[in-house]
Every structure is written in C-alpha cells, then in structure tokens.
Image (cartoon, rainbow, N blue to C red):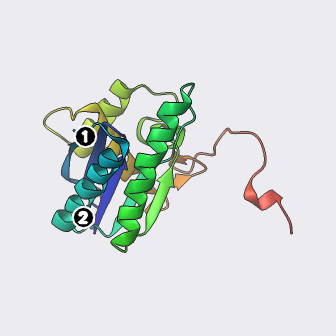
Amino acid sequence: MLILGIDPGSRITGYGVLDVAGSAPRYVASGCIRIRADELAQKLAQVYAGIGELIAVHRPAEFAIEQVVMSRNADSALKLGQARGTAIVCAANHGLPVSEYGPRQIKQAVTGSGRADKAQVQHMVTAVLGLSGVPQADAADALAIALTHAHARAGLLTGGSFGGHRSRRKGTSWRDFRP
C-alpha cells in the first residue's frame, strides 16, 4: 500500500511516496513539483496537474498533507493555503482519503522534537528510510509527512509523538467537550 505525502507550496510542492505494505515503511519516490507560472490561477493549475500525474503514476491508496501554519506574512499564508486546498481537491477527486498533520506533529514524529529544523528532518528521513543521499528539503518534508501518516496508521503516533509518549501540550482536548 502506497502513501503520497505532500508538502504544499505555490512555488515548490514537495512529494514523497512510501510503501507501507511491510513491517517498515519503504522509500518509493520523492521530489518536487516546480511551479513555473506567474499568475496564481496558473500556479494552482500546475499544482493540481503535478499531483494528478503523481497519483496516476504511483496509484497511492492514501494521501497525507501538512496543515497550514499561520505566518507573519498573511499573503504568503493565503497562497500556501490555496496551494494546499488545490492539492486536497486533487486527492479527493481521485478518491483518496486525506489525512492532515501539523508541522510540530510531523517534526515530533520524525525527529523526536517538535522544534527540529529542516536539516534535522532531512537527516532523520535519510536515516529512517536508509537513503543513499539527502533529499531536497521540500521532498524530505513530504517524506516526513508520509512517515508521520504511516506511523499514525500503525498506531505508533499517540498524542503527537511516536512510541506511546504523551504530548506535553496543555489545554483541552475534544474529549473534554460534552454536547
């Protein structure tokens, strides 16, 4: 069974494909969809077409994507959200179930720290998947998203981390609310 992980972007969209049929996730493919258009509508069309092509080639069973992070630049956050929405619509139009993970959750799952930097994520993705070289940052992020989903499916992602460790996040959970 294949998982397609997507790190959305309006200029570069990273992708990673993992096979989770065995006891450990196995690397299949990764790379970047490089957006060449200038107009937003054309950029989104290229994101959609690129992800559609990946789905046609690899035929994944599930789709995982990073959630939008609010940044200081509202314009960048909006563009990222539009690219993300385009990717989700493409997956849904191809009948794929979509799972979403927050950046801290992904970093925590892959490196053990929700505050890991890109180099740490790249290093751990390379080590966990036994890659011969370090993938480009956006591709590594997409592989990290796919790895997070693989571990969530296997029940190894509990409270935002692997191995049954509890999340240290304070606040309420959905269980605290009663209708």
Q: Which element type, helix, strand or loop, lies under badge 1? A: loop
| Residue appearing at x 39%, y 48% in the figure | 145
The disc label shown at residue 37, or none: 1
The quadrant holding residue 52 is bottom left
Any part of residue 20 in sight: no
Task: Answer above or below: position of 109 versus 93.
Answer: above
Q: Residue 149, image x and y in percent?
A: 42, 56
The disc label shown at residue 7, or none: none
User: Contact (CB < 8 A) between labels 1 and 2?
Assistant: no
Q: Which element type, helix, strand or loop, lies under badge 2? A: helix
Q: Quadrant of the N terminus?
A: bottom left
Q: Which residue bears the numbered disc 2?
A: 55
Task: Answer above or below: position of 73 versus 47.
Answer: above
> Label 1 amino acid?
Ala
Report crowding for label 1: few under 14, some 14 to 19, many 20 or more residues within 10 A (C-alpha): some
Q: Residue 118, image x and y in percent?
A: 37, 27
Task: Answer above or below: position of 154 versus 173.
Answer: below
Eye-nearest disc, 1 or 2: 1
The quadrant holding residue 154 is bottom left
Front position in the image: 38 or 155: 38
Q: Quadrant of the C terminus?
A: bottom right
Q: Residue 71, image x and y in percent?
A: 55, 29
> Label 2 amino acid?
Ile
The answer to whether 84 appears left or right of 176 in the picture is left
Point out the tag, 1 or 2, that comes first from the N-terminus: 1
Report crowding for label 2: few under 14, some 14 to 19, many 20 or more residues within 10 A (C-alpha): many
